[in-house]
Image (spheres, coloured by chain):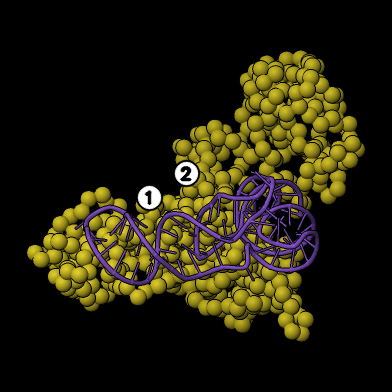
Chain colours: A yellow, B purple
Amino acid sequence: MKLNNSYFYTLRENPNDEESTSGTLLIRGGYIKKSSSGIYMYLPLGYKVLNNIQNIIREEMDKTGCQELLMPCLLPEDYYISSGRRANFGSSMFQLKDRFNKTMVLGPTHEELFAVAASMKIQSYKDLPFSLYQMQTKFRDEPRPRFGLIRVREFIMKDAYTFDKDLAGLDEQYAKIFQAYKNIFDRLGIDYKIVKADTGVMGGLLSEEFQAISPIGEDTLVLCDQCDYSSNLEISTHVYEDSDEDEKEIQLVETPHKKSIEEVAEFLNIDLKKTVKALLMNVNGKLHIFFIRGDRELNEVKVQKLLGVNEINFANDELIATSNAVAGYTGPKDLTGATVIIDEEILHMKNFVIGANKEGYHYINANPKDISYDICGDIANVVEGDKCPVCGGRIHFKKGIEIGNTFKLGTKYSKAMNLYYQDDNHQLQPVVMGSYGIGVGRTMAAIVEQMHDDNGLIWPIEIAPYKVGIVLINQKDEVQVKLANDIYDRLMAEGIEPVFDDRDERAGVKFKDMELIGIPMRITVGKMAKDDQVEFRMRTATENTVMTSEEAINKVIELCK
RNA sequence: CGGGGUGUAGCACAGUUUGGUAGUGCACUUGGUUCGGGACCAAGGGGUCGCAAGUUCAAAUCUUGUCACUCCGACCA
C-alpha cells in the first residue's frame, strides 16, 4: 500500500475518552474508531489485523476437522426461551420487534442455534461425533463497556461446538480443540494462562478460560509459585490451616466507635487474620449473615452455589432489624433472627476477635466452641500467601483478560433443544455438547496491551497489517524514488505487501508514524540510495543496519517465513 | 441502576464564576524558507458552542428539561 492517496491517518494526541493503552494506541494509529459506547469501526489497518488473527484461528480450527459455517445474528427470541436462557441473559440481550410485532433478539452466543443445525444431521450414534464453528458478530448490551475493544457491546467471536454420543467422546473432542486453542494463542505470541472457572450462565460440567496476563485484566487468576495449579479466583478452592495455639478463655472487651474490622484490629493491636468479620446480606428477602476471616472477601459465586440462589445483595437497615445484629459489632455468638453462615476456615482458627452484638463491644479469644451457626462452607476468596490446594506451595495472584473459554456443556442444551440420537440399543439419548469461544477483537486488544512501547504499537510479524514498511526520505530525489519503488515491486512479487510511505512529509513524521502503527520491519531509503544502500531496522530495535537493497529484501523474505 | 465528571472546528483544550462580535495548539489550504526523528514564517479556510424550551435588549455563559460520552460502584462470558 502506498500512503499517498490512501485512507491512512494518525492522531498526535490521545483521545480524551479512552482509558486503556490498547484503546488509545489503536485509535491514534487509525486502526479503530468508536461509533458509540462499546461499538467500534474497524478501519483498514484494524480490519487487516482482525483478519490476520481470524486466519490463524481458522487454520488451527480447520486442522481439528471442525467445519466452518455462518449463523444469522438476528434471531427470534423463542430459541432462548426454549433453552431457558432468555431470563438468564435478561437485559444484556438486545431485543427488537419486527413489523409483525414478533420479538427478535441479536444473538449473544449460539448454543441453541447450533443444536438446531446439528439436529438436521443427527439421527443415530453413527452420525457422531462432529464439530462446527463460525466467526460472527455477537451482541451483548454490557452495563458498562470499558477498555477499548476489551469490553464491548458488539464483537466478533469465534464460537465452536462439539457433538458427541457420550462423555468419553466429549473428552476427546474437547482435548483436540483445547490443543488448537493453545496453538492459536502460542502463534499469536500472547502471554497467557489457562485457569479453571465458573460455568456461569452457560452451565455444564467444566469451564476453562484462556487468560491473557495484563494488569488491566478484570479477572483475578490464582497461581501457585511451586506447581502449575491455576484457577479463576471466583472458584478457587481454599485449603484450611489449623492453628497450633492453645485455646484461651473468651473475653468481652470495649471497642468504642471502632466499627470496621480494620479499626478494631488496629485498636486491639491484633492481626486482621485473627479476626472474624460479618457481612449482612439479603438473600431472597431474608437476612443472611456471613462470617469470614477479617482479611478476606466474600465470594459471591461460591455463596450462590452453596445456597442455590442466583442473587445476593446487601441487607438494608429494615432487614437487619429483624435480628439482634448491631452493625459494626455483629458476631456469631448468641446471634438470632438471621440465617448464619460461617466460612469453614473459622473452625480451624483459634483465639480470634468477633463482634459481641452489643454497641461498642467485641469478644477476644473466641474459639469455634463459642459460636453457633446454621450453615458452614467455603464462602470466601483465597488471598495471596494461602496454601496451594495441589502441592502445598504458596499462591499468588495475576490479573487476566479472558480471551478464550472452553466449556464441557454435557446434555443441558441438547435436552432443552430436543437434540437426541438413537443408540445401538434403539434407545434415544441426548447428544453431549461442548462449546468453545474466542473473542477476536478482545484478543487483538490483549496483544496490544502486552506489546507496545512509548512510541506505539508493536505487532508480531504474523498478525501485523503490513510486515514491512518502506520509508522514502526524499520524494524529490529520483534515485531514492526509483530504489524505493524497486524494493516495493520486488516484495510485492514475493507476495509480501509493504506499506510504502511516499507522502510529502518530513522524515521524522514518517518514522514516528511507522512506529506508532507498529510495523515490525522498516527499510529506509535515503542518501545512500545512490550506492544501492538502505537501512534495515526491526520495530523492537534501536539501531539501523546498513545493507544493500538486495540484502534487505532477502532479510524481509527470511523473517516472513 | 446508584454516585461523580464532561459535551465549544477533524483532534486536544481555553472561554462559563461576573451574559455583550467564537478563541488557542495540532491538523488542513496557499506562498516562502527548511527538510534523516512529530520544522519555521506569513496569509487563509473550517464551528447551528450536544439538543430543546425558558429568562433577557442581548445566552457558549443564567434556569429547566433532555440526549450523548465518561469515571467509580453494582452487574457481567
Label 2 and label 1: CA atoms lie apart by 30 Å
Neighbour class for label 2 at 10 Å: few (<14), some, many (≥20)? few
In the rendered image, the quadrant that contains the C terminus of chain A is bottom left
Q: Which residue is mark 1?
A: A453
Neighbour class for label 1 at 10 Å: few (<14), some, many (≥20)? some
Residue appearing at x 82%, y 24% in the figure: A356
In the rendered image, the quadrant that contains the N terminus of chain A is bottom left
* Above-or-below relation of A442 to A298: below
Residue appearing at x 36%, y 52% in the figure: A455
Residue A419, picture quadrant: bottom right
Residue A198 location, x and y as percent? 63, 52
Residue A117 location, x and y as percent? 61, 79
Kind of residue sitting beneath label 1: Asp
Front residue (pair B32, A447): B32
Q: Residue furthest bottom?
A: A100
Secondary structure found at label 2: loop
Residue A415, picture quadrant: bottom right
Residue B27 location, x and y as percent? 40, 63
Residue appearing at x 56%, y 45% in the figure: A220
Q: Which residue is mark 2?
A: A228
The disc label shown at residue A533, or none = none
Residue B77 location, x and y as percent? 62, 58
